[in-house]
Amino acid sequence: MTYSRIFRNSYDRGDQRSNKAIFRALLDRIWKRLQGWKEKLLLRAKKEVLLKSIIQAIPTYLVGVYKFSSSVIRSIQSAMAKFFWGHTGSQRKIHWKSWDTMSTPKCLGGMRFKDLEVFNVALLGKQAWKLVHKENYLYSRVMKAKYFPNSSFLDSFLGTAGSYCWRSIWSAKALSKEGLI
């Protein structure tokens, strides 16, 4: 089974259709990058460096703009784990540690891979923080004019006609409020 088929099977189960094309392109890009490397010829230390420096950097822009569903995050983590531990055709090698354990710091027995879910919330929180503290930025002025013209971001409501980007940033509002304390 190829990485592309793994991504499609796990992704098609319940994500919204409107965002499907965005995440499909991301998953295909990650899959193509993983396919370009000869995993049999690389040591685990080299695989770790490749995954941390290249694969985890690919979704950085989208993570800061859109809230990733848990199925997309699981698909990315699954592909990275299969590449790290080894995966040939239909044979799956033993994964000696779970991906959650590998995302912990090295001093606690992990490998310090990024936890994409936490990274996603943190970058969305950064965008929300900019809406609160950088009101003269073009980005802040556009978002204010469109989604909360008569209030501040912290007093804004989600509404029903907001874009996926707005809903994603609004979901990090609680994190911004917590950071203000």
Image (cartoon, rainbow, N blue to C red):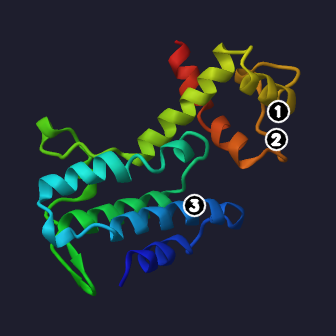
For mark 3, give the secondary structure: helix
Mark 2 residue element:
loop
The residue sitting at 13% across, 64% down in the picture is 96
Q: Position of residue 125 (x, y in %)?
A: 55, 30
Badge 3 crowding class, 10 Å Cα cut-off, few under 14, some 14 to 19, many 20 or more, is some
Dot placed on the residue nearer the N-terminal end, 3 or 2: 3
Query: Going by the image, does 9 lie left or right of 133?
Result: left
Q: Is residue 138 above or below residue 101?
A: above
Mark 2 and mark 1 lie on one chain; the one further toward the N terminus is 1
The mark lying in front, picked from 3 and 1, is 3
| Amino acid carrying mark 1 in the image | Tyr
Q: Nearer the viewer, residue 100 or 2?
A: 2
User: Which-is-in-front pick, marks 3 and 2?
Assistant: 3
The disc at residue 23 is 3
Instruction: Report the residue at 15% width, 39% height from top.
Output: 106
Looking at the rendered structure, the kind of residue marked 3 is: Phe
Query: Mark number for residue 30?
Result: none
**Relative to 21, does residue 137 appear above or below in the rendering?**
above
Say which quarter of the image contains residue 33.
Answer: bottom left
- Give the CA distance from mark 3 to mark 1: 25 Å
Distance between mark 2 and mark 1 Cα atoms: 8 Å
Query: How many tags in the picture?
Result: 3
Question: How far apart, in angstroms, are the residues tagged by discs 3 and 2?
Answer: 24 Å
Q: Does 55 sit above or below residue 30?
A: above
Most extreme residue toward the bottom, as rendered? Answer: 90
Q: Which residue is mark 2?
A: 159
- Residue under pointer 1: 147
The structure residue drawn at horizontal position 67% and vertical position 36%, both measured from the top left corner, is 170
Q: Position of residue 144 (x, y in %)?
A: 80, 25
Q: Mark 2, residues whose alpha carbon is within 10 Å: few (<14), some, or many (≥20)?
A: few
